[in-house]
Image: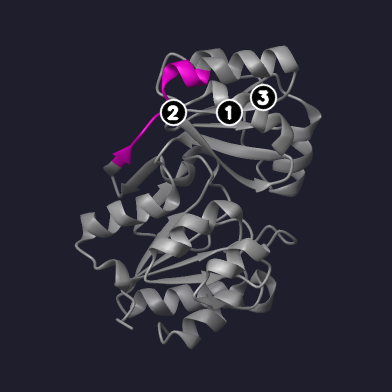
């Protein structure tokens, strides 16, 4: 195995505990040590840039970001990849959300807004994920004329199956039973990892990726080493090269020690 030169971390359930909404101190210490040894640190999240509000403890260590499940990647002020959803697909989902009366988070490059807001958004995003910086008074209409990078509808997998045929250029990456993240086809974390590695001149074998949810499958498969958290869903564990302990049980530190990163 080649020495790891870059590490890619999902946020929710990987870096950040679902229980405390914080990054464990052991994870902060491990990433700080890896960074001091020259390892590059990347975020690989389904979150829009606008709601990455829970990684302040390590933000100063981050070299770049894969956001929107791969639809927007950047290093510093340099955009590596920006791939919005075709307008026809966006219009189909907005119309469906209006007709079938479900909440929909519309995500621009740096802004987000709710369409048809419902209590489920507060229950899951605010109370469950600690997202407290979405302006619920902002109209999603303001974002629809600009590129939309991700749509997050709050509905079941059965509801999803009804609308996705009307969005032929889009794909769903569900990591929660109550909602999913929809991006343009081809924009996933695995393809984003390849783009970032190419930009940095890294061999893909020199990249390690950590994740726990369904939207992490592609990046764990693409990376030189894919690490599933102990709290990961079974499907993620099945494709991982290594399964560590949970986010609350020093999972990132233990895996980085096991792999010789620290």
What residue is rendered at 52% in x and 80% in y?
255
Q: Distance between the residues labelled 1 and 3?
A: 26 Å
Q: Which of 29 and 230 is in front in this view?
A: 230
Q: Name the residue under label 1.
A: 164
Q: Which residue lies furthest to the left in this view?
A: 201
**Residue 136 image label:** 3
Pick the quarter of the image with the C terminus. bottom left
* Circle 2 residues within 10 Å: few <14, some 14–19, many ≥20: some
Left of 118 or right of it: where is 143?
left
Q: Is mark 3 on a helix, strand or loop?
A: loop
Pick the quarter of the image with the N terminus. bottom left
What residue is rendered at 23% in x and 66% in y?
202
Q: Which of 211 and 111 is in front in this view?
A: 211
What residue range appears in magenta?
Answer: 81-90
* Circle 1 residues within 10 Å: few <14, some 14–19, many ≥20: some
Q: Distance between the residues labelled 2 and 1?
A: 9 Å
Tell me residue 120's x, y (percent): 78, 34
Q: How far apart are marks 2 and 3 (CA)?
A: 28 Å
Q: Name the residue under label 2.
A: 169
Residues under numbered marks 1 and 3 in contact, where contact means CB atoms less than 8 Å apart:
no
Left of 34 or right of it: where is 141?
right
- Magenta stretch: includes residue 57: no
Q: Which of the 4 quarters of the picture holds residue 78?
A: top left
- Marks 1 and 3, the one that precedes in the sequence: 3
Residues under numbered marks 2 and 1 in contact, where contact means CB atoms less than 8 Å apart:
no
């Amino acid at each position: 195995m080649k020495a790891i030169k870059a590490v890619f971390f999902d946020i929710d359930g990987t870096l950040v505990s679902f229980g405390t909404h914080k990054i464990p101190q052991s994870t902060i210490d491990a990433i700080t040590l890896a960074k001091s040894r020259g390892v590059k640190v990347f975020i690989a999240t389904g979150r829009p840039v606008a709601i990455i509000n829970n990684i302040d403890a390590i933000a100063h260590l981050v070299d770049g970001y894969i956001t929107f499940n791969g639809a927007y990647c950047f290093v510093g002020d340099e955009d590596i990849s920006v791939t919005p959803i075709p307008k026809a697909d966006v219009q189909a989902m907005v119309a469906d959300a209006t007709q079938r009366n479900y909440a929909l988070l519309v995500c621009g490059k740096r802004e987000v807004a709710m369409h048809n807001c419902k209590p489920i958004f507060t229950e899951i995003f605010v109370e469950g994920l600690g997202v407290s910086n979405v302006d619920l008074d902002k109209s999603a209409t303001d974002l629809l004329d600009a590129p939309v990078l991700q749509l997050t509808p709050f509905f079941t997998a059965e509801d999803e199956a009804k609308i996705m045929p009307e969005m032929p250029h889009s794909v769903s990456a569900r990591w929660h039973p109550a909602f999913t993240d929809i991006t343009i086809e081809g924009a996933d974390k695995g393809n984003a990892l390849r783009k970032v590695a190419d930009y940095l001149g890294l061999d893909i074998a020199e990249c390690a990726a950590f994740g726990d949810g369904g939207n992490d499958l592609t990046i764990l498969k693409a990376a030189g080493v894919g690490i599933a958290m102990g709290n990961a869903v079974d499907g993620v564990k099945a494709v991982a090269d290594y399964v560590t302990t949970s986010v609350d049980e020093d999972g990132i530190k233990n895996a980085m020690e096991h792999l010789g990163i620290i």
